[in-house]
Image (cartoon, rainbow, N blue to C red):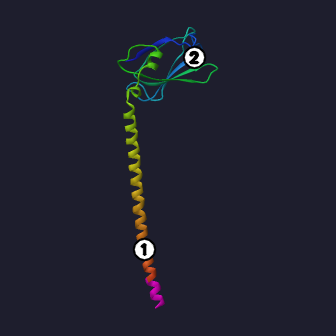
Amino acid sequence: MPVLISGVLKDGTGTPVQNCTIQLKACRTSTTVVVNTVASENPDDAGRYSMDVEQGQYTVTLLVEGYPPSHAGVITVYDDSKPGTLNDFLGAMTEDDVRPEALRRFEAMVEEVARQASEASRNATAAGQASEQAQTSAGQAAESATAAVNAAG
């Protein structure tokens, strides 16, 4: 069920921003939105905007004529989100805000251990192949030595 995001887009001096497009680009696929799809809203001359936004996570970009695109942030709209302004959603706490730093470090360590285990497995396979090649070379050297002794004798 869509959630209403509406308000007045203003600059730092409180002046309504004109000739602007607010873009919402889906960060991932949800039950109603496909990843990377883009929705946009053009505020009126007074800066007023109103969007019915589906549940999902979006990157918010402001496109103002004569200026490069401005990444405003990431918003997450939940099924139970209350209507609010774009500022309300941009300022809302995210999962990253509430995840303790220790947990983030632990997750990074788990990823590093998995990477190292994969590398160790590749190294073990390479070592096994090198061992087989060494045994083959040793056998060939023994045959050559026997042939040399027989030829000399």
Amino acid type assigned to the residue bearing label 1 in the image: Ala
Residue visible at 40% across and 53% down? 120
Residue position marked by numbered label 1 in the rendering? 138
Residue position marked by numbered label 2 in the rendering? 20
Q: Position of residue 32 (x, y in %)?
A: 39, 24
Left or right of 50? Residue 68 is right
Which of the 4 image quadrants contains residue 15? top right
User: In the depicted view, which residue is nearer to us: 93 or 1?
Assistant: 93
Left or right of 32? Residue 49 is right
Q: Position of residue 134 (x, y in %)?
A: 43, 69
Q: Position of residue 63 (x, y in %)?
A: 57, 21
Q: Secondary structure at mark 1?
A: helix
Q: Residue furthest left?
A: 80
Vertical position of residue 51 compared to residue 112: above or below: above
Between marks 1 and 2 in the image, the one whose residue lies nearer the viewer:
1
Which of the 4 image quadrants contains residue 77? top left
Magenta stretch, overall SS: helix
Cα distance between the residues tagged 1 and 2:
75 Å
User: In the depicted view, which residue is nearer to us: 96 or 25?
Assistant: 96
Left or right of 64? Residue 6 is left
Q: Position of residue 91 (x, y in %)?
A: 45, 19
Amino acid type assigned to the residue bearing label 2 in the image: Cys
Tell me the quadrant of the picture where the N terminus can be found. Answer: top left
Which of the 4 image quadrants contains residue 67? top right
Q: Residue furthest top?
A: 46
In magenta, the rendered stretch is 146-153
User: In the depicted view, which residue is nearer to us: 116 or 44?
Assistant: 116
Queried whether the magenta region covers residue 32, the answer comes back as: no
Residue visible at 38% across and 38% down? 107
